Image: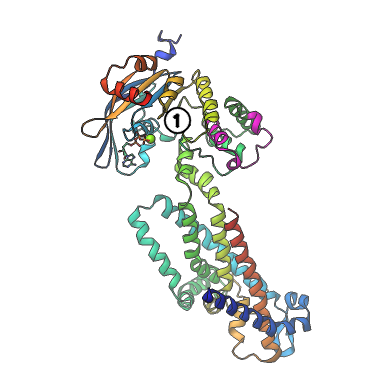
Amino acid sequence: MALALSSISALALITIFIIIQGAPIITEVGMFNFIFGMTWAPSQGEFGIFPMIVGSAAVTVGAVLVGVPIGICCAIFLSEFAPVSVRNFFRPAIQLLAGIPSVVYGFWGLLFIVPFIREHLGGPGLSILAASIILGIMILPTIISISEVSLLSLPRQYKEGALALGMTQWQAIRYVQLPAAKSGIVAAIVLGLGRAMGETMAVIMIVGNSVALPQSILDPVRTLTTNIGIEMGYAAGEHRQALFATGIVLFIVIMILNATAQYITRRK
Amino acid sequence: MSESGLKPQMKYKIETKAVNLHYGSFHALKDVTMGIRDCSITAIIGPSGCGKSSLLRLFNRTNDLIPGVKIGGDILLDGDSIYDKSKDISVIRKRVGMVFQKPNVFPMSIYDNIIIGPKHHGVKNRSKLEEISESCLKQVALWDEVKDILKKSALDLPAGQQQRLCIARALAVEPEVILMDESCSALDPESTMKIEELMANLAQKYSIIIVTHSMEQAVRVSDWSAFMMINEDKIGTLVEYSETTKMFQNPKDQRTEDYITGRFG
Ligand SMILES: Nc1ncnc2c1ncn2[C@@H]1O[C@H](COP(=O)(O)OP(=O)(O)OP(=O)(O)O)[C@@H](O)[C@H]1O
Ligand SMILES: [Mg+2]
């Protein structure tokens, strides 16, 4: 009880601190100019984070496009087809995947994904695509484990009932079991979204970090998190406040995502 | 009168030939040979654990899903082996429908529950699907109760209605045989009565095989009864199989008599 209280109050303190630090700059440049401003030039007092919002959105959506189909297929394989021995091997392996430090993912992306994109697809290689692939892999453990649990926790009778109607095993999965597990799978996707959006270190290394609206997925971008990660070390004054304000935006978006995930899982 | 000159009730819809079933090393059924007649209700009765469900699940190849299962002998549907390698299991399951002990409606709307089967067997036309849903719901006497809430979740229905919906869902794929494994045991007496009436109606078109723990139910609804029991080696066997009236008035086997009188008296 005391522990729970203290962790909640720690969270509250962090929130209050970020808001106190970031709020003044938002009132100064105006909410609209801050969020929709196209120029980020702290030395000239210009604080528009729109390109970074676009960057975060692009990289997050990309991660979901990469990670969700693979993750759901893995979950279906593990819950429906894999023999117990295979399942028992993969479960800890997937947990291990979640434990790899994100800088290692970034390093790996820099060594393999970035050069591959540069040579075969063009552009600088440091790009939305590179970050999407790496983030897509990083969210796999979240997607797989939550989807798998929600598929496994379905009553066996759903599957039996579907097969008894003469549906094939794939039809049963596609049209009965997946829809029945929908809320769990959507929650998995939303949590994956939050994880992809919040990731910083791996993204800094492979996303290029240039503050401009991207024209294609081969262009480099900067995300909200990488903006904070790169500049916080030397920022002062209004610049520093603007980074905290960026944090507020990020914080709100991720809170909304997590609340959505909770709402979805609880509604059932 | 059918072509063979036999009344449909006399024709075998399903025949089992010396069927043996093993779950891994456990021998569950031994040498079960019986013929199940078309357009009639056959009840399988017997003490718990004697293999009634196991036998029933053989008729639509549901046991195939259990790892380590070995099936010996043969089962014929209209004279054709259903365990033949060339047979498409989903076609067999379409022809031999199943209703389970607990209602297992899918977590989707009432309407979608009914049409999901026909949809996957190639009926795409919407008005045709609506027609199927109406006629199946009417057959189980559920239409008047749900016709205004077809888009509502089937999970919100009371259990008795859910079970009738499951029967309607099974009917929607136009099966020839319907298997029911203690399908009334989770229901109140009134719902049970409704479903028994329904079985009697359905038996004019389909052959129905039920597993039941209730002697009274077997007597009330079935034309034929099969009594099963484990033998001295703890293997499930078919002890006696005859017309229900004969079996209950004049059982041939001492074990049948003991079971029936024990239960009734
Ligand atoms: N999947 C399985 N794996 C191993 N053994 C099984 C399996 N299913 C059933 N058995 C065994 O086979 C025997 C027959 O079981 P079955 O369920 O067919 O009996 P039943 O007559 O339907 O019993 P009840 O009246 O309790 O439903 C039992 O001893 C049971 O333990
Ligand atoms: Mg049983």
Q: How many marks?
A: 1
Q: Output the chain of dot 1.
A: B
Q: Which residues are magenta?
A: B143-168
Residue sitting at x 52%, y 70%: A117
Of the pair A127 and B165, the residue shown nearer to us: B165
Q: Is residue B161 magenta?
A: yes
Name the quarter showing ligand 2: top left
List x then y, in percent, for residue A210. 63, 80
Residue holding disc 1 = B180
Say which amino acid is labelled 1.
Met
Of all residues shown, which one is farthest toward the front?
A: B265
- Is residue B130 in sight in this rendering? yes
Q: Position of residue B60 (x, y in %)?
A: 40, 32
- Horizontally, residue B146 falls left or right of residue B64, namely right
In the rendered image, the vertical position of residue A44 relative to residue B125, given as above or below: below
Viewport quadrant of the C terminus of chain B: top left
Q: Residue at x 33, y 14 (%)?
A: B250
Q: Is residue B246 magenta?
A: no
* Residue B69, placed above or below residue B35: below
Which residue corresponds to the image point at 39% horizontal and 19% vertical from the top-left?
B224
Residue A26 is drawn in which quadrant? bottom right
Q: Residue furthest left?
A: B233
What secondary structure is the stretch in magenta mostly built from?
A: helix
Image height of A1 relative to A188, above or below: below
In this image, B229 relative to A166: left or right? left
Q: Is mark 1 within 8 Å of ligand 2?
A: no
